[in-house]
Amino acid sequence: MGKKFEFSKLFINLLFTVLSIVVVLPFLLVIAVSLTDEKSLTENGYQFIPTTFSLDAYRYLLDAPDILLRAYGVTFTVTIIGALAGLLLTAMTAYVISRQDYRYNRATTFYVFFTMLFSGGLVPSYILITQYLHLKDSLLALILPILLSPFNIMVMKGFMSKIPLEIIESAKIDGAREFRIFFKIILPLSTPALATLGLLISFTYWNEWFNAMLYIDDPNKVPLQLLLVRTLNSIEFLTTNSEFTGQLGIDLSSFPNSSARMAIAVLAGGPMLVIFPFFQRFFVKGLTVGSLKG
């Protein structure tokens, strides 16, 4: 019996080790390609160990460091403010509809769920942001459209529904009001769900570029993702219009095409890959517990 248990445990550990390696290898390949010379990539293809080491892709992308640093600053600002505000509003909304003593519990829950199925569309959203709220070229135009997600609300509601109502009633008997109950009792008990959704919301804001393309014309307020998208489009234009670039005397033989694409992926995703391990221990618990009861 003991040997069978040890064998099954060894098999599971080995299986997850293999799966982890399979997941990590593509990231390592992306980093390796971003550090490889373009001519070497053309001749030898993608390799985990660069045949010819080169930083040309990063030199191309970091040619104007002020622009990149400013884009990083905008993205960090939008991500931090949006994640904190979105997480607070998500928790407050979920707390209300998770209370069994709330008279309109089912109606409000259906209202939130209904927005997962239908939305106003792009044109009404654009008119609302630009014509009524006058948020053109404002960082709020990057924060408000994705501030609340019905999916996040439903996950948080499922987690908060597991908190016994007796805790809230006993706090009321002791004289605590609703805001004190929420901030002093409910939020500390919801730490796993808050960490999980905080990470998901942060990813959403960090990867967002479409709203910036719609609402941001000021070059000083361009976020990182939109800057990298524009850089990628410039690379594609240069590489797909060789006749035009040849007339201008531009030599594309050593232009970092493939390596620059991978360098863009490293610059865009690197910070979040560093942050994720700190939230990993909360991630699974918060997501699974929150999805048990919706």
Image (spheres, rainbow, N blue to C red):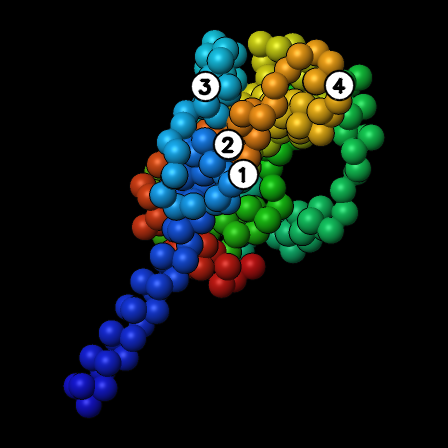
Q: Which badge, 3 or 1, comes first in the chain's sequence?
A: 1
Label 3 belongs to which residue?
A: 59
Of 16 and 115, which appears nearest the observer?
16
Q: Does residue 64 appear in this view?
A: yes
Where, by quadrant of the figure, is residue 10 drawn? bottom left
Residue drawn at the location 79% of the way across and 38% of the way down: 120
- CA separation, marks 3 and 1? 19 Å
User: Where is mark 1, residue-wise?
Assistant: 42
**Relative to 149, does residue 54 appear above or below in the rendering?**
above
The reply to whether dot 3 and dot 2 touch (C-beta < 8 Å) is no
Write the residue at 39% across / 34% down: 52
Which amino acid lies under the numbered mark 1 shown in the image of this protein?
Answer: Thr
Q: Residue beneath label 4, please? A: 244
Q: Position of residue 151 (x, y in %)?
A: 59, 49
Location of the N terminus (image quadrant): bottom left
**The C terminus - image quarter:** bottom right
The 10 Å Cα crowd at callout 3, few under 14, some 14 to 19, many 20 or more, is few
Marks 2 and 1 in Cβ contact (< 8 Å): yes
**Amino acid type at mark 2:** Glu
The answer to which of marks 3 and 2 sits earlier in the sequence is 2
Q: Marks 4 and 2: CB-CB under 8 Å? A: no
Measured along the vertical axis of the image, is residue 232 above or below residue 6?
Answer: above
Is label 1 in a helix, a strand or a loop?
Answer: helix
**Residue located beneath label 2 in the image:** 38
Q: Amino acid at mark 4?
A: Phe
